[in-house]
Image (tube, rainbow, N blue to C red):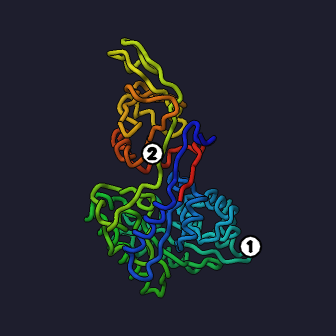
Amino acid sequence: MEQHQKRTWAEIDLGALDHNYRTLRAMLPAGCRFLGVVKANAYGHGSLAVARRLEQLGADYLAVACIDEAAELRVSGITAPILVLGPTPIPLAAEPVRLRLTQSVGDLESAKALSEAAQAEGRPVKIHVKVDTGMSRLGFVCDEAHMADTVEQIAAVCALPGLEAEGIFTHFSDADSSEEFTMLQFTRFLDLLEALKGRGITFAIRHCAASSATLKFPCTHLDMVRPGLALYGHYPDPSCEGLDGPGLQPVMRLCTRVAAVRTVPAGSYVSYGRTARLEKETRLAVLPIGYADGFFRVLSNQGAVSIHGVSRPIVGRVCMDLSMVDAGEDVQVGDVATVYGPEQPVEEAAALAGTIPYELLSAVSRRVPRIYRG
């Protein structure tokens, strides 16, 4: 038995990552860049290992959510261009300059702070202008009522010293479900680009397609795409399946090892809150995985794991560090249980939890060791 597999671990198949990268890249038009999203610890897969692999594969860009995630990659030797998608606090405006990052900019105030920092450091900093075409989260508001004002503000940003306005981007809010609203956002984005071009302002990299749009709307690929979930082998929604040729391969298999098997009498309550009562004498397998590992408590009494290829239902509430499942007649101490994997898809657990695969994958905690294959 391998030491690091005695409790709970996540197997990360880098060969599957390679396959997904090449599959997605093959969908792109000539010259279209590929940005690999490695924020949130690479959706739970381990940001440093994934970033290194994507560098080797030839990804043009990486993306993180915040300055701390970017710094972790830089100090670990990642040299690829890194886009910080989220805002960097004004007091930390010098950090993107020092770390040679590309910073997203969605308001004039933060752009001015970044400009001042770049001048103080004596080095320009690349920026990607963030445009809000309908997400209502971050960026310069870009709709029919605000177009003229947004053009003026972005022109002011691009004129600031020390800033190299390399890119401009937006984010679709409903590409999973609504083609109509996605095309409205895309049209707004194109209209803004045309208005800026009329002012003599153009960008080398225009991008708006995350996983869903990369798979479903080729017209939105432009100069770069930003696959996240799809890169890790999962579809943002069922309508995307079958659209990518050879098919995507899940990169993560979350596993745990049976710590104990106990025969519990009929009528016994199981776990906290007595939410489960055994109708008959039952063999229960105790698994050393719980919500502190990212195994959601909401899966209590409804989720399952796979042992010997058989789905084993969770009995009682998921605890912080442990969970109990029905062991049947064949499960023994030391057997491996697949929590998420091909035989126990994370999509099924997400549906039971009333959420999306993104949340379950990124919630796998850092105390769970990642074991890299391939």
Q: Taking 171 as reference, is 367 left or right?
A: right
Dividing the picture into quadrants, the one containing residue 225 is bottom left
Q: Taking 68 as reference, is 222 left or right?
A: left
Foreground disc of the pair 2, 1: 2
Q: Amino acid under label 2?
A: Leu
Q: Nearer the viewer, residue 279 or 209?
A: 279
Q: CA distance from mark 2 to mark 1?
A: 42 Å
Residue placed at 44% from the left, 82% from the top? 31
Does residue 12 sit above or below 334 in this rendering?
below
The quarter of the image holding the N terminus is top right
Q: Is residue 280 visible?
A: yes
Q: Is residue 208 visible?
A: no
Question: Looking at this rendering, what residue extends furthest in the left direction?
Answer: 180
- Helix or strand or loop: what does disc 1 sit on? helix
Q: Taking 57 as reference, is 300 left or right?
A: left
Residue placed at 35% from the left, 37% from the top? 310
Does residue 9 sit above or below 277 in this rendering?
below
Dividing the picture into quadrants, the one containing residue 48 is bottom right
Does residue 246 sit above or below 314 in this rendering?
below
Q: Nearer the viewer, residue 342 or 204?
A: 342
Q: Amino acid under label 1?
A: Ala
User: Residue 81 in the image: x percent, y percent?
Assistant: 59, 72
**Crowding at mark 2 (Cα within 10 Å: few <14, some 14-19, many 20+):** many
- Helix or strand or loop: what does disc 2 sit on? helix
User: Residue 253 in the image: x percent, y percent?
Assistant: 47, 48
Pointer 2 residue? 360
Pointer 1 residue? 120
User: Residue 100 in the image: x percent, y percent?
Assistant: 66, 71
Residue placed at 60% from the left, 64% from the top? 52
